[in-house]
Amino acid sequence: MKGLQARAEAAGERAAAQAVSRLRDAAREALPGLSVEAEPGRVVISGRGLGRRWLRDAALRWPGGWLR
């Protein structure tokens, strides 16, 4: 049973890493001029004018939609 759990955890970690890289790539495409970096478990978006863009663009308030 422990082997099955270890394989499931490894598969989950791979899926999470793939989702992070897909989100990073989608954010880079959608947000020219901003810095987009992937870290374990998260994507960091930074840059000048991000606050104004966040208020203006609903896609920035829910970036998970880019994973569809």
Image (tube, rainbow, N blue to C red):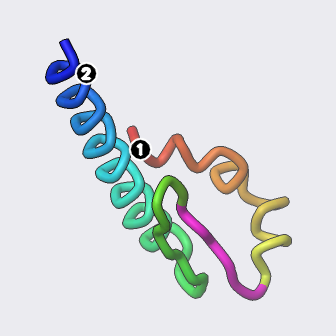
Q: Nearer the viewer, mark 1 or mark 2?
A: 2
Q: Is residue 4 above or below residue 28?
A: above
Please give the label number shown on residue 55.
Answer: none
Q: Which residues are magenta?
A: 43-48
Q: Please, what is the three-letter code of the amino acid marked with disc 2?
A: Gln
At x 49% / y 67%, what residue is drawn? 39
Q: Position of residue 61 (x, y in %)?
A: 72, 49
What residue is disc 2 on?
5
* Magenta-span inclusion, residue 35: no
Question: In percent of the image, x 60 and y 82: which residue is there?
Answer: 34
Vertical placement of residue 5 versus 10, above or below: above
With respect to residue 59, does 21 lie above or below? Answer: below
The residue positioned 37% from the left and 44% from the top of the image is 16
Q: Is residue 55 left or right of residue 44?
A: right
- Disc on the earlier residue, 1 or 2: 2
On screen, residue 5 above or below 37: above
